[in-house]
Amino acid sequence: QVQLEESGGGLVQAGGSLRLSCAASGRTFSTSRMGWFRQAPGKEREFVAAISWSGGSTDYADSVKGRFTISRDNAKNTVNLQMNSLKPEDTAVYYCAYKRFLLGDYENWGQGTQVTVSS
């Protein structure tokens, strides 16, 4: 079982930046993939970005491409999401997630961290 804990959320003005971090504890696999999802009030949770164990493979939602960057530090067992040029529509609770393999559903989730972008 992998435990995940997010940090770094907060309130920022439109156009600003925030950096989210996710610390993973427990046994992780070299085949694993970690991702960020978000859920805005009244909306379903949506995919934001994902990264492979090596960091060589990344994937982004179209809505954040060019603005967000996902990275990971396996020595520290952390995954980061650098968010630039934030927009009010990026306001949501952001969740970190983990799965052991590329295919299949995400198996472990963090509690989430609130990101609020004011206009």
Image (tube, grey):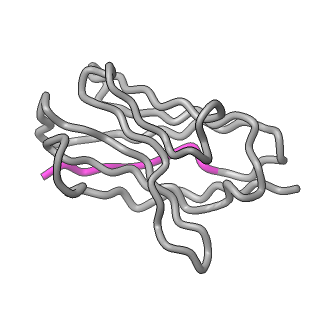
Q: How far from the left and from the top, in percent, is residue 104?
A: 17, 53
119 displayed left or right of 33: right
Identified at 33% across, 22% down, the residue is 55
User: Which quadrant of the view contains residue 56?
Assistant: top left
Q: Report the residue that reaches farthest toward the right.
A: 119
- Does 110 sit above or below residue 51? below
Identified at 20% across, 47% down, the residue is 99
User: Which quadrant of the view contains residue 68?
Assistant: top right
12 displayed left or right of 105: right
- Does 41 sit above or below residue 46? below
Q: How far from the left and from the top, in percent, is residue 29?
A: 12, 34
- Does 119 sit above or below residue 99? below
114 displayed left or right of 84: left
Residue 4 sits inside the magenta stretch: yes
Q: Which residues are magenta?
A: 1-9
- Does 93 sit above or below residue 33? below
Q: How far from the left and from the top, in percent, is residue 11?
A: 74, 52
Identified at 59% across, 59% down, the residue is 114
Q: How far from the left and from the top, in percent, is residue 72?
A: 37, 26
Residue 5 sits inside the magenta stretch: yes
Identified at 64% across, 55% down, the residue is 115
Q: Report the residue that reaches farthest toward the bottom.
A: 42
Q: Nearer the viewer, residue 12 or 64?
A: 64
Q: Nearer the viewer, residue 74 or 31?
A: 31
Q: How many marks?
A: 0
Image quadrant for the C terminus? Answer: bottom right
